Image (tube, rainbow, N blue to C red):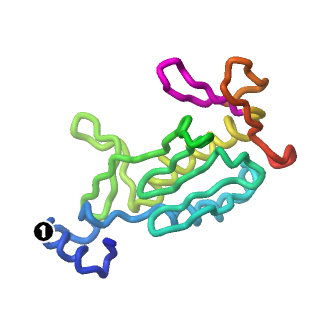
Amino acid sequence: MLTENSQAWYKCRAIMNVSKYKSTCFRPSLNHPFRQWVRNNQSRPHTQPFRAIRNSTGIIKFTIVGLHPAIEFTLGVGVLYVTVHWDHHTWSYITFGPIPLEEDDNNYFRDQVAGKFSRIYPTREPLWNEMIFEPFLEWLNTNLKPAQWLALYCCADGRKSAAFVEQPDAEAMYILPVWLNPNAS
């Protein structure tokens, strides 16, 4: 494991010849900033509370109380995924992040266009809030919260996809209720 105190981390840092924060070997997790963001935004409209399914170093798998278990969220290093797993297959996923991130003199940048950065952040947290957590909250409110059914499709070539639908679709391979508890949304 590559932790800040491990021998591998120091070796990687020495090979890279960079400070601990600029090293590509040491990438901070979104776990703590996400939990802080959830605490700070509890009063904003969203669905029921989040519930951790699995919590390991650098990764949290979680769900929302009352949500169908086929829909799962994964928070990793610099990225948040929404995935649909059913019948031993991944049917669809949405990614929030990763963010192209560069650091210079303790400032963080994104969206380099024509050699200029469009936004400067004093720390990673405001960058993550704007580029990962806020779009995720918007997606929860506009797509997931009002959804009634999850339609799972399988194409003739084997590709799989999922869509939130208002009414069950006869062409779907599976139709699952999004919310197991109708009062959850």
Of residues 145 and 165, which is closer to you in this image? 165
Expressed as whole percent of the image width and height from the top left, the position of residue 79 reads 45, 51
Expressed as whole percent of the image width and height from the top left, the position of residue 139 reads 62, 40
- What residue is at 69 percent from the left and 30 percent from the top? 174
Q: Quadrant of the N terminus?
A: bottom left
Expressed as whole percent of the image width and height from the top left, the position of residue 116 reads 26, 41
Relative vertical location of residue 21 with respect to residue 120 in this rendering, above or below: below
Magenta stretch: give its range.
150-163
Residue type at the position of mark 1: Ile
Relative vertical location of residue 184 with respect to residue 13 in this rendering, above or below: above
- What residue is at 17 percent from the left and 74 percent from the top? 11
Does the magenta stretch mainly form a helix, a strand or a loop? Answer: strand
- What residue is at 24 percent from the left and 64 percent from the top? 23
Q: Which residue is mark 1?
A: 15
Expressed as whole percent of the image width and height from the top left, the position of residue 109 reads 33, 51
Horizontal side of residue 146 vs 30, given as left or right = right
Q: Quadrant of the C terminus?
A: top right
Is residue 139 highlighted in magenta? Answer: no
Horizontal side of residue 44 vs 105, given as left or right = right
Quadrant of the rendered image containing residue 144: top right
Horizontal side of residue 26 vs 82, given as left or right = left
Relative vertical location of residue 96 with respect to residue 9 in this rendering, above or below: above
| Mark 1 element type | helix
Is residue 152 highlighted in magenta? Answer: yes
Graded by Cα atoms within 10 Å as few (under 14), some (14 to 19) or many (20 or more), the crowding at tag 1 reads few
